[in-house]
Amino acid sequence: MGATGSKLEKALGDQFPEGERYFGLENFGNTCYCNSVLQALYFCVPFREQLLEYYANNINTVDAEENLLTCLADLFTQRSSVGQISSQKKKTGVIAPKRFVQRLKKQNELFRSYMHQDAHEFLNFLLNELVDILEKEAQASKNDQGTPSEKVANGPSSSQREPLVTWVHKNFQGILTNETRCLRCETVTARDETFFDLSLDIEQNTSITSCLKNFSSTETLNAEDKFFCDKCCSLQEAQKRMKIKKPPHILVIHLKRFKYIEQLGRYKKLSYRVVFPLELKLSDTVEDADREYSLFAVVVHVGSGPNHGHYVSLVKSHNHWLFFDDENVEMIDESAVQTFFGSAQEYSSNTDHGYILFYESLGPCNKS
């Protein structure tokens, strides 16, 4: 592995970013789903910085118990140029995320088997678990002080208090609004819901922009799908649409590549070609007429089916694109990103398809 590391250092040469570390992650049998997502999160700079800041402020807390948050922070500290380990002064190499993986399996039996796991399920579980831990800590801190604490966590709130917001929310949370218009009385009912990622249906030879348009397209509710209108006090035909009310700072897009096919009685992988741009303009949102985003990471599913395969990730760091495949890290050209759009034909030898996309807003960042 030393050879791979030195090869990467040689490729970057004088352009090796000051203070940056590029480490592969050891695979413990089937943990590529975990490794690929961890690489994307590590190179989500605002998330990484806030996690390390949190860890630095809480590392000496008496009776601090181990949880997924402390294990993740410990792993990121090993890779970072800050902290005690400073990656043994090495810029490249391999780290074994053993403690994190053990904690993950202890926490959730879904990830205990050696079956092929889903990277999107893992990402969802991890972000929600981090929020859960931060909420409990904020509540415990509030109880200890016996006074209303500063709003530092977000979670189920009682009617007396507003939801509180963590740095996880500040990075990843957006708000959708579900609008339903009664076609009889024209009353519009709007219901807001929060999201950490958008799951988009995909079609052959399409683009992210077109998938987002479909996501926000108007649907007519009629026949057995009629809507109960409170104003009419009866079931009525209606029009329904979902809009992004508040875009997140980090926009995570999950492409629904695994679809249940009734005739087959099983899930099938959709290898459709879906173009994802390096720069994405999010339009038709309720707030912020246009929000521009830049792609910084892609989790790729390699394989022809949903129950087997492999995950790798592409990451943009300091204007360089890197390819992470468990222990191996190499530089790739920006033009190589388009080889992961998918296949224009159903049967193709290319099985490496973009699955989870990470975009960062080019607008102002929400700092904690």
Image (tube, rainbow, N blue to C red):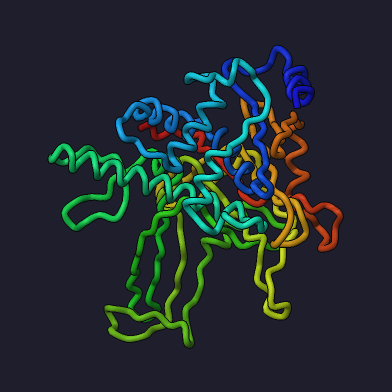
Q: Quadrant of the C terminus?
A: top left
Q: Residue furthest left?
A: 146
- The residue lying at 46 percent from left, 47 percent from top is 127
Report if residue 284 is visible in the image: no
User: Would residue 364 appear left or right of 312 to someone viewing this image?
Assistant: left
Identified at 74% across, 29% down, the residue is: 331
Residue 117 sits above or below residue 75 on the image: below
- Using residue 109 as the reference point, say whether residue 273 is left or right of it: right
Q: Position of residue 316 (x, y in %)?
A: 64, 32
Residue at the image position 58 percent from the left and 59 percent from the top: 200
Residue 283 visible in the snapshot? yes
Q: Position of residue 156 (x, y in %)?
A: 29, 55
Image location (x, y in percent) of residue 329:
72, 31
Task: Name the quarter where the N terminus is drawn.
Answer: top right
- Image point 27% across, 50% down: which residue? 163
Q: Position of residue 349 (x, y in %)?
A: 86, 54
Q: Is 217 displayed left or right of 7 in the figure?
A: left
Depth check, front residue: 218 or 361: 361
In the rendered image, the residue lying farthest to the top is 14
Corner quadrant of residue 227:
bottom left
Task: Count all numbered tags in the image, as a single digit.
Answer: 0
**Side of 63 where 225 appears, left or right:** right
> Is residue 258 or residue 191 the one in the foreground?
258
Q: Is residue 365 above or below residue 154?
A: above
